[in-house]
Image (tube, rainbow, N blue to C red):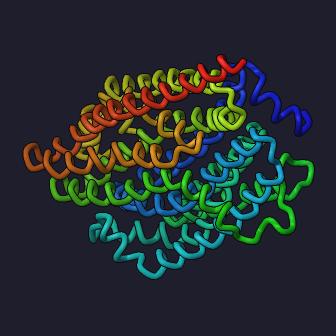
Amino acid sequence: MDKIERLNELGTAPEGKLLWKYSIPAVVGIVVMSIYNIIDRIFIGQGVGPDAIAGLAITFPVMNVSTAFGVLIGVGAAARSSIVLGQGRRDKAEVILGNSFVMTLLLATFYIAMLGIFIDPILRLFGASDASLPYARDFMLYLLPGMLVINVCYSFNNVMRATGYPTKAMVTMFIGAGLNVILAPIFIFGLGWGIKGAAIATDISMGVSALFVVAHFINRKSMIHFKRGTFRLRKDVLLPIVAIGSAPCIVNTAGCLVNAFINNTVYKYGGDDGVAAIGIFTTIIQLQVTFVIGVCQGMQPIVGYNYGAKKFDRLKRTFWLAALVSTIVCTLGVAACQVCPRLISRMFTVDAGLLDVSENALRMSTWMFWMAGFQIVITNFFQAIGAAGKSVLMSLTRQVFFLLPMLFIFPRWWNLDGVWVSFPLSDFAATVVSAVLIAIEFRHINRLLTQQRLAH
């Protein structure tokens, strides 16, 4: 398929077929990445012990800092590329690509340096105890050098998909995930490197994937590619990118703060077993969210292109298809957590005390999570159409406006169970807000459709 056909199909092919074409590679690629992360945690939990799982749980919010800076540029660049390609401005998309690449490198260098200098205080802030700190420190220190290539890989994989290459984007993720699955057990068990072996395996694997992503954008046959003159930073290019990318950046940054509060609260009421249980819960939820994010990544170029081309009927149909699929995925995940939480927990540990805490956490925390898919799709829809303010608001509702106050109040009444019950209640409240905002947005879109029909 040539460049013109790749663009034209976004505005002409059936929406269901397009969503399938773009979402399946995204889902497969991102799920594979999540599965290898889960495998890492299984290796660490079974081979090193519960304290190592707790240490790894402490690193989740710290790694979210890396994700936050990555999506600030990567998601914004992908959304802006889709919109300007829908407007027929491929030269502008290449300027977006060049500016985004430079900003990704600059931001990654900055935050890696800060994390390296203040690693111990940061880990303590996020809830590390004397028992879990050595494991968390080992993992992070060896992961830091690879965070730059991780940002490049994830961010520009999004741009690759948004500019018409969903299958190629999936393959680049497969390369990294497959290599990691091979290297992790060798480094953890074979060489006896323990938790640091998992970090080194991730560095190498993501480095190889990043090389494939960069090679795609060097290739002049790609839809958009690196060009001389596009790397000079321009305010008019970067501001719209940052505006759109600020929503997922804020949600990841808020996630860091909320996770720090969760870890400290859980440690207060449940000790290291509680923190380890949060690590298991987060891993399982992340796998479910991963499916939904894959669907949203498939939705984004279709919605963005058709928004730029003012084809609003296609935009709406794509949204509702994505919302339906995502809700089904989350419902199935909730069913698994309610029916067999102990079996799920047993993948990560054989420690009886931790199994009891994890079983209770999974059952109590997930019973309203079936709503989350709808809310995530709405947030990503606003990103795709460039509605930065609404996307930022949606990003803050669940974690900051609802979850954080509940985590402050409910554990005082119900101890550790108060932490678990905060999650479903915040899921419900955030979904209600999401439904109101999307109803208002579609009312505006329907007015635009009416105007178009009257004009013709």
For residue 44, side relative to residue 235 (left or right) = left
The C terminus: image quadrant = top right
User: Looking at the picture, does residue 281 appear above or below residue 208?
Assistant: above
How many marks can you see?
Answer: 0
Seen at 77% across and 43% down, the residue is: 85
Q: Work out which residue is located at the far front of the displayed protein and give it.
A: 455
Q: Nearer the viewer, residue 413 or 198?
A: 413
Q: Nearer the viewer, residue 57 or 306?
A: 306
Residue 5: % across, % down = 87, 32
For residue 211, side relative to residue 286 (left or right) = right
Residue 439: % across, % down = 43, 26
Seen at 71% across and 41% down, the residue is: 170
Residue 353: % across, % down = 23, 46
Seen at 44% across and 49% down, the residue is: 392
Residue 154 showing in the rendered view: no
Q: Work out which residue is located at the far left of the displayed protein and give it.
A: 413
For residue 55, side relative to residue 240 (left or right) = left
Seen at 55% across and 27% down, the residue is: 445
For residue 218, side relative to residue 152 (left or right) = right
Residue 307 showing in the rendered view: yes
